Amino acid sequence: MAVSDAQRRATEKYRREKTRAAHTVFYPADMDIWEWYSAQENKQAYIRGLIREDMNRQASANSGSSDAPAHS
């Protein structure tokens, strides 16, 4: 089934306004990282998982600290 012109425009508008993309370059010194990444079955899920783990780790580390000065 062909996609209508209106549907195509709506999809393009949604992507332009609601999504973001990132591009990463791997240099020869990082080929081990590239090979590991390339071996992942679902690359997008892998990257998102790593970022979420890091966010959770930082949130946990920050939840134990306080901005208030310590009293002696």
Image: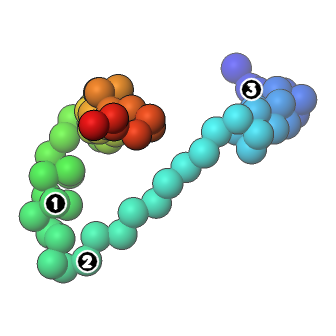
Residue 9 lies in quadrant: top right
Task: Give the foreground label among 3 and 1.
Answer: 1
Mark 3 — residue? 2
Figure colour scheme: rainbow
Q: Which mark is residue 33?
A: 1
Q: Distance between the residues labelled 3 and 2?
A: 41 Å
Identify which residue is drawn at 76% across, 39% down.
17
Residue type indicated by callout 2: Tyr
Identify which residue is drawn at 60% across, 45% down.
20
Q: Earlier in the sequence, mark 3 or mark 1?
A: 3
Q: Is residue 24 visible?
A: yes
Question: Percent x, y for residue 51?
Answer: 34, 39
In the image: residue 71, left or right of residue 22:
left
Can you name the residue that lies furthest to the top here? 1
Residue 10 lies in quadrant: top right
Mark 2 — residue? 27
Q: Is mark 2 on a helix, strand or loop?
A: loop
